[in-house]
Amino acid sequence: MKIVLTAILVDDDYPVVRYLSQNVPWETLGIELTGCYSNGMEAWEAAERSLPDIVITDIGMPKMNGLEMLEKLSQVHSHFRAVILSCHNEFSYAQQAMKLKVRDYILKESLNVEQLQNVLRNITADLSEEKKRDLEVLIYMQKESLNRSALKEKFLKDTLYQFGWTKEAWLKQARLNGMELEAKYHVPFVVSVDRIHETAKSRKMNEYTLGFAVENVFQEILDKEQRSFMTCWNHNQLAVLICCDDPAKEQQLAYSLQKGISAVQTYLKVSITCMAGPAAWNPEEIRRALLPMLTEPDHRFYLEEGKIHPFKPAAYSNQDIYTEYSRFFAAMNDSLALNFPDQLARVVTEWGEWVRSSRFHPGDVKEWVLKLLMDLQMKTKFTLQFKPEVTEEKLHEAMTGIHTIEHLQCWLTKHLQELSHRLSVLAIHSKRTEVIRAQQYVIQHVTEKITLEQMADYLNLNSSYFSRLFKRETNQNFIEYVTWSSCKGASRCCSSPA
């Protein structure tokens, strides 16, 4: 594999910089000249953004001299090489330069392209060999890591799905895979990354990469505290077994897990939630404890994020989730129409508290939210001729990535507030308050019959004047607007369950 190195030229003598940049066959040498700078400060600021492999620099320059610049660079970059271009009166700096990864010290009086080219050819050969070795080590480490991960994932699946495994056979298999799990008991935990889709998107990362980073940090902390086994179940869940000879010391185990949670929060700025199963004596008990925690994510729905929770099979209410639908629909619709984001947030908070106290099944809660959003979008689509930016398919996709009521409540608040903002922009075709109030009133009372005279009285305006004003500002007749909106909105709302 061909390795291309990068280089920068630093000299306040412009003719020298121009001569070298134009006459050295950089591409032939396998070097990309990424920048030319007139002083050490400019070069250092550029190097901070993109570290060069080779630095060719003068010593005496304004703002920051060449040696000061090389000293700063050596503190953050251990593999660069430097070439000094100097005058006779600066030759006393040669000894100091040799300590700063300076490969050659060339006097400007004798400088020629062939001389520098030979120096760069030697540097290129040296650095290329070094980079190849580093790359080989990195590839080897990645393969080792992938092999270890594959072995651990297979061991977990064997533990969960291979019945009749004795503890001795299970421990022997662990040893064969390089894992020392000898202990009287094993305490199972499931570590879940909270809101992984949103976090990965905001970091511009792949979800699997983020999950891998969480695993590495958590494993590093846990290894200092306890002997344990940890592996990915999927991109946002880790299965953990902590070796324990005395399950009564659960407080110590919780402390170890809390340190891992805090480390992930500190270093990665990621929230994780842990579910703890009962201490298991053999593989069958481990399987019974771990399997439901890993395969039934609904158990997390009512748990507080970023905490450790003892695992308990969830029990859900049998009552009809739609008994309060009309009340919450009306409250959210009014807040949307009036563009009251704070009031909207309070309504969603009240809804979240009602859901928590009722303990509805998570699937029913998500379906309820989907219906609410589709009804609101359908209503606003006909009332304001507004085309929703979020399709039903995208809403379903968003629901799939939400695993807790805490997350769902935050997401719903944000979604509705953004919708309210877009509607307020659409509603304001002019700066006439009367038109804005009329549109808001229609949104709030979409299922009611509203006459021109009633609307004019509500606004304290002459009906003829209001009719002309509404037509001029919205390019639409008010009566037709209300009739069409009411029919469409009512037909949609009438389909809601009682």
Image (tube, helix red, strand yellow):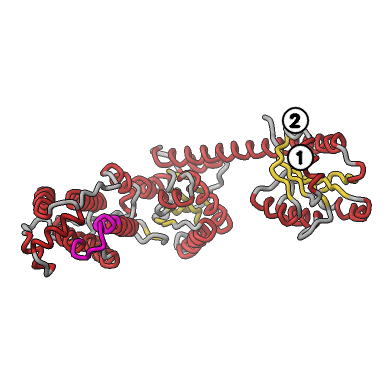
Specify the farthest residue to the bottom.
460
Stretch in magenta: 422-435
Could you classify mark 2 by the number of other residues whose Cα lies within 10 Å: few (under 14), some (14-19), or many (20 or more)? few
Q: Reading the chain from its start, which is encountered first: label 2 or label 1?
A: 1
Q: Is residue 356 visible?
A: no
Q: Which residue is mark 2?
A: 28
Q: Kindly identify which numbered label has been placed on residue 21.
A: 1
Query: Mark 2 belongs to which amino acid?
Result: Thr
Q: Is residue 384 part of the magenta span, yes or no? A: no
Q: Kindly identify which numbered label has been placed on residue 397.
A: none
Question: For this view, does 32 lie left or right of residue 58?
Answer: left
Could you tell me how far apart the alpha carbons at marks 2 and 1 are, in whole angstroms?
A: 13 Å
Q: Report the mark closest to the observer, 2 or 1.
A: 1
Residue at disc 2, secondary structure: loop
Query: Mark 1 belongs to which amino acid?
Result: Ser
Question: For this view, does 209 lie left or right of residue 141?
Answer: left
133 to 63, vertically: above or below: above
Looking at this view, is 73 or 281 the one in front?
73
119 to 467, vertically: above or below: above
Q: In which image quadrant can residue 110 be found?
A: top right
